[in-house]
């Protein structure tokens, strides 16, 4: 399951966040105040900048109830104040009836004049057979403003002749969603809005495809995601206790949460945590990857023996020299007219370390110019290599993202000292330490796939890198590298290049700004002076003799 919190974890989390709870009734008053996530949805829709909003949601968290409040606010206003008709469409008559009942409740709570609430028959004609007319039962509330809320149990074609706000609820379960969206989006021309809200129903569903397009940056629509834990943190269970006249407790909420998860069983990820169901399918097709492997990008590899640290200085330098010379040649030949972004996936014992350097041209096309792979290389040598690469492009570097898992954090920290550590993607600094999570993969992997599909990313041709990219699988609808390692014993790979590339692409999309950073001057202590000889030996192993670009090593 996607949520790692146990029942005990949730109890402690909620006890810490709700240490002093007054009676919910005293806080809320009448049950007409929106919960946090409902309020966020309405707030987005009240913004004139939001024309289309897609909402991924958990089952039965009351999002429809919140959208009903917005429908009433819109339909009750005069035209000069932005009033318009509101239309609700879902896959069942029971849901439309429930929506109209919720709108009636909100109308009474707002003391809005509603002229009537009635049922009527809506005629729907099949273009393939104009003589056939289907009568669809619908529900309607008419307001003194002249506008109305219209709720339908299916998708009538005559929706094209109407205007206003369209709310498509549980859109993943609506027949012919793509066609329905075409009709609804026509409302935008005259100032209408479209809200598409749903629990997931598979990763290949048009609803999830549309969400992935938004996350990938292909679509400019707004997006909101609310899973069960988000709803509980915003007070869902407190509201349930208020309605049912029960006392809230962290233990009670934890038990409530666990009961719901147990009820849905294997479907909990999709039904409750907004993860579309799908088998562990391949994320990128091999022909697509190969079609993008057209860049002239060398792959440099350094594989050191296990006893490297026990060798004398001369033996160490001899082992490192070929890699050092090859890297020197690549860095010396780099074109400094484009911008650059760097990704670094750290490994030491079981996994490879992989670094990936991308150039970014004026058309925002990303092109790989260098990648390196390190196996059995100690941490200090890895830092020296990374320092050389970043120093070579420092004046054109827009960002560098580092795997901050385990020992990877020490590399990110040391590079941050030299080039500026960035605390968040919108902040200052060039070096971003990334702590991987399902949220990171869910948000940051779709733009990478979109770059492959849109021909805005080009890589060097390498069989191992193709294999690593093919290793990324859709696990519960989220692209991840499975825990299984592939390859011969002692040389196994774990999708390492795919992670480094994802980090480099992420770094290339961080907010760009001109950034001048000077490291804090450092005066060595006596202890550090005693170790200067060892450090000089280390630097000597990687120093570029006669390098035309000073300060790389």
Image (cartoon, rainbow, N blue to C red):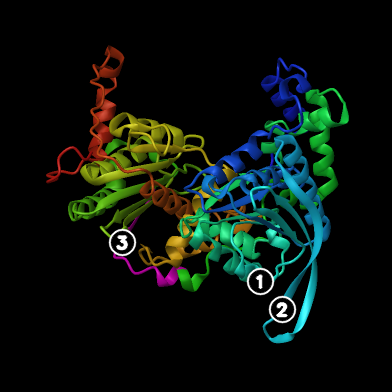
Quarter of image, res 525: top left
Q: Residue furthest top?
A: 526
Mark 1 or mark 3, which has the lower sequence index?
Answer: 1
Front residue of 487 and 311? 487
From what the image shows, is residue 114 above or below residue 461? above
Asked which quadrant contains residue 44, the reply is top right
Q: Which residue is mark 3?
A: 297
Residue 498 got which mark?
Answer: none
For the magenta stretch, what is the residue range?
289-303
**Residue 301 included in the magenta stretch of the image:** yes
Q: Is residue 522 left or right of residue 283?
A: left
Q: CA distance from mark 2 to mark 3?
A: 59 Å
Query: Could you say where residue 5 lies in the image, as x and y percent from the top left?
Result: 71, 35
Q: Residues within 10 Å of mark 3 (few under 14, many from 20)?
A: many
* Residue 478 can be seen in this image: yes
Residue at 73% in and 46% down:
114
* Of the pair 263 and 352, the residue shown nearer to us: 263
């Amino acid at each position: 399951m996607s949520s790692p919190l146990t029942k005990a974890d949730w109890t402690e989390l909620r006890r810490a966040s709700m240490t002093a709870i007054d009676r919910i009734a005293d806080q809320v008053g009448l049950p007409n105040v929106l919960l946090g996530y409902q309020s966020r949805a309405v707030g987005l829709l009240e913004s004139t900048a939001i024309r289309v909003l897609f909402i991924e949601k958990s089952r039965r968290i009351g999002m429809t109830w919140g959208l009903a409040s917005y429908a009433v606010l819109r339909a009750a206003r005069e035209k000069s104040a932005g009033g318009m008709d509101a239309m609700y469409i879902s896959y069942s008559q029971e849901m439309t009836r429930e929506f109209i009942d919720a709108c009636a409740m909100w109308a009474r709570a707002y003391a809005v004049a509603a002229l009537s609430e009635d049922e009527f028959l809506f005629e729907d004609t099949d273009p393939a057979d104009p003589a056939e007319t289907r009568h669809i039962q619908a529900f309607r509330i008419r307001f003194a403003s002249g506008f109305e809320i219209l709720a339908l149990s299916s998708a009538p074609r005559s929706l094209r002749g109407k205007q206003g706000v369209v709310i498509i609820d549980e859109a993943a379960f609506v027949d012919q969603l793509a066609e329905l969206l075409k009709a609804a989006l026509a409302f935008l021309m005259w100032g209408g809005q479209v809200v598409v809200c749903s629990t997931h129903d598979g990763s290949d569903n048009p609803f999830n495809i549309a969400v992935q397009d938004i996350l990938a940056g292909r679509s400019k629509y707004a997006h909101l995601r609310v899973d069960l834990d988000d709803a509980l943190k915003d007070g869902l269970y407190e509201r349930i206790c208020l309605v049912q006249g029960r006392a809230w407790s962290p233990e009670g909420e934890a038990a409530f949460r666990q009961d719901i998860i147990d009820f849905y069983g294997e479907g909990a990820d999709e039904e409750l945590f907004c993860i579309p169901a799908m088998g562990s399918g391949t994320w990128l097709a091999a022909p697509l990857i190969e079609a993008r492997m057209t860049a002239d990008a060398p792959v440099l590899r350094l594989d050191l023996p296990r006893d490297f640290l026990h060798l004398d200085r001369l033996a160490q330098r001899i082992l490192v020299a070929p890699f050092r010379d090859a890297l020197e040649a690549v860095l010396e030949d780099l074109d400094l007219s484009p911008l650059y972004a760097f990704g670094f996936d750290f490994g030491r014992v079981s996994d490879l370390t992989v670094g990936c350097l991308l150039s970014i041209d004026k058309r925002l096309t990303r092109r790989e110019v260098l990648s390196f792979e390190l196996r059995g290389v100690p941490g200090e040598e890895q830092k020296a290599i990374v320092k050389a690469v970043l120093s070579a492009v420092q004046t054109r570097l827009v960002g560098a993202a580092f795997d901050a898992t385990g020992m990877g954090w020490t590399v990110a920290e040391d590079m941050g000292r030299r080039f500026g550590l960035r605390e968040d993607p919108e902040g200052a600094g060039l070096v971003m330490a990334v702590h991987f999570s399902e949220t990171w993969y869910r948000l940051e992997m779709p733009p990478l796939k979109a770059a492959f599909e849109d021909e805005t990313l080009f890589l060097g041709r390498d069989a191992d890198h193709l294999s690593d990219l093919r290793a990324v699988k859709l696990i519960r609808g989220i692209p991840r590298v499975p825990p299984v390692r592939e390859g011969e014993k002692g040389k196994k790979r774990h999708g390492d290049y795919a992670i480094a590339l994802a980090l480099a692409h992420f770094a290339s999309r961080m907010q760009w700004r001109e950034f001048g950073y000077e490291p804090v001057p450092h005066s060595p202590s006596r202890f550090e002076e005693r170790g200067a000889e060892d450090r000089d030996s280390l630097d000597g192993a990687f120093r570029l003799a006669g390098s035309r670009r000073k300060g790389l090593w």
